[in-house]
Amino acid sequence: MGWTFYNSSGQRLSTAATSIDVLDIDGATDIGAAIVDADLFIIDDGAGGTNRKTAASRIKTYVAAGAVTYEGGNTTEATTTSTSAVDLLSLTSLTIQTTEAALLCVSYRKSTGAADDTALGLKLNTTVTSEAVSGGLRVGDTTTSNVAQLGGSLIFLTPRVTNYTEGGAGFYGTYQTGGNGKLTNSINNPFQSAASPAVEITDVVWRGITDNASNTLGADESHAYSLAAS
């Protein structure tokens, strides 16, 4: 004889097809953990009755489509004590198209050691668009106070099409380590040295300089995002 199956609510389950109306979701055991990329969902492909499974990772791709794309990052701290501007922290293998706007961020710090300044600059591909210099409109800096300092810089770039290769602005703020108050904040200029290259951005490089080799300038947790063209 054949078998008849019932769910926990006593509803009979057909061996041919089980309606979603009789799935006992409330009575199921909770996953008891965060949803991860490998978790599976049921989906009606094309709303035509073709039911398939899909991984949770596809939901992230669908939600982000046409909006914000994570292009890449670097979470390994890089440091310098150089008194000349040098490449400090790099993001590579990016694909930010000329028609896409972009968001760039980075965290930085200065060790205590001398009452001198440190500063960040920006390079897009091979073009230094805002050099790391003492004074001027940098994309991030510390003060001349002889204390350990922390800061962060956020830059927005508009699409870099013909005649609009200097569209963008940013902000940075620097604080004394230990939550002892704000030291400085400023609107920064990502194009004080040169316009952005009117090509796909594949590399973002944060440049660095210290006024005194007794200070260490560090950069970490840099990330790049592109905003889809309309």
Image (cartoon, helix red, strand yellow):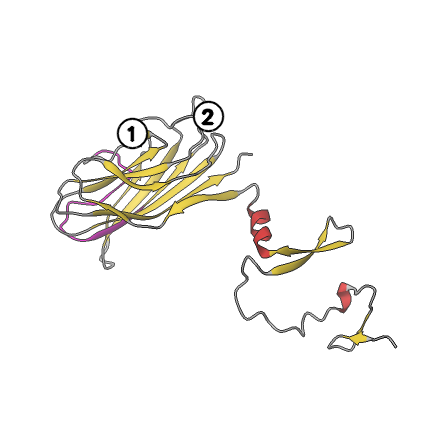
Label 1 and label 2: CA atoms lie apart by 18 Å
Q: Position of residue 43 (x, y in %)?
A: 69, 55
Question: What residue span does the magenta drawing correspond to?
Answer: 136-152
Q: Position of residue 221 (x, y in %)?
A: 35, 49
Residue lying furthest front: 1
Q: Which mark is residue 29?
A: none
Residue lying furthest top: 163
* Main secondary-structure element of the magenta-colored stretch: loop
Along the line of sight, which residue is nearer the eye, 136 or 91? Answer: 91
Please state if 35 lies on the left or on the right of 9 as rendered.
Answer: left
Write the residue at 13% across / 42% down.
Answer: 212
Q: Which residue is mark 2?
A: 161
Secondary structure, mark 2, is loop
Write the residue at 73% across / 48% down.
Answer: 46
Write the residue at 57% across / 43% down.
Answer: 65
Identify the image quadrant of the C terminus: top right
Q: Which residue is mark 1?
A: 192
Label 1 Cα crowd, 10 Å radius (few <14 / some 14-19 / many 20+): some
Check residue 2 for magenta coloring.
no
Q: What amino acid is labelled 1 in the image?
A: Gln
Q: What amino acid is labelled 2 in the image?
A: Val
Check residue 142 for magenta coloring.
yes
Snapshot quadrant of residue 138: top left
